[in-house]
Structure formats: C-alpha cells, structure tokens
Image (tube, helix red, strand yellow):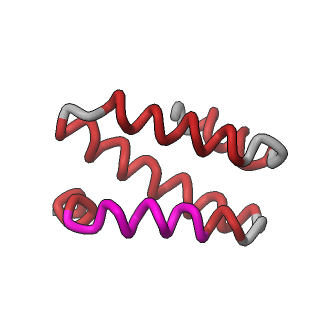
C-alpha cells in the first residue's frame, strides 16, 4: 500500500528528495535516502530500474561535494 502511494506521487517524491538534500542537514539526508529507497522499489515494480539508476547517477553528480550524502547513498545500495 505504501508503494502505491509513492507511485501516485512519484514526481513529487523526487522533488521532495531534492528539497531535503538542499537543506544540507545530515538528518534530512536520511529522510531523502528513505524516499530514494521507496522510489527504487517503485522503479523495480514498474520495470524502470535503468531510469531510476540514471536519476541517482545525476543526483550523485549534482551533489558530489557532499560526502555525507554520498556515503548514505552507498550504504543504502543505491
């Protein structure tokens, strides 16, 4: 059920991830990672992992100077 909600708000969820990362607060990074995990699960369900991974790669490149965020992304296996 939770993922069904994420599916209906997928674009908004990506924007929320961007907003959380923009705060530059490590605690908010954890929230962003949680949302990314949901987005990954949705992409997997929809057979769109390639597109998801492209978005994550873009996100990594945009925030390459935030080692705390990048560590969290790695730890989550994203």
- Please say whether residue 15 is one of the residues in the magenta stretch: yes
The one nearer the camera, 74 or 50, is: 50
In this rendering, is residue 12 above or below 52? below
Q: Main secondary structure of the magenta part?
A: helix
Instruction: List x then y, in percent, for residue 44.
Output: 26, 35
Q: Residue at x 20, y 66 (%)?
A: 8
Horizontal side, residue 44 vs residue 13: left or right:
left
Q: Residue at x 52, y 39 (%)?
A: 56
Horizontal side, residue 6 vs residue 38: left or right:
left
Magenta-tinted stretch: 8-19
Q: Residue at x 75, y 62 (%)?
A: 26
- Please say whether residue 47 is one of the residues in the magenta stretch: no
Instruction: List x then y, in percent, for residue 6.
Output: 27, 62
Instruction: List x then y, in percent, for residue 50.
Output: 35, 28
In this rendering, is residue 16 above or below 76? below
Figure label count: 0
Horizontal side, residue 45 vs residue 59: left or right:
left
- Quadrant containing the N terminus is bottom left
Quadrant housing residue 25: bottom right
């Amino acid at each position: 059920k939770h993922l069904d909600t994420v599916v209906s708000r997928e674009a908004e969820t990506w924007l929320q991830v961007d907003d959380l990362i923009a705060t530059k607060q490590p605690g908010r990074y954890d929230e962003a990672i949680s949302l990314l995990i949901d987005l990954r699960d949705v992409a997997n369900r929809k057979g769109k992992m390639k597109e998801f991974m492209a978005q994550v790669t873009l996100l990594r490149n945009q925030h390459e100077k935030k080692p705390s965020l990048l560590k969290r992304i790695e730890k989550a296996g994203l």
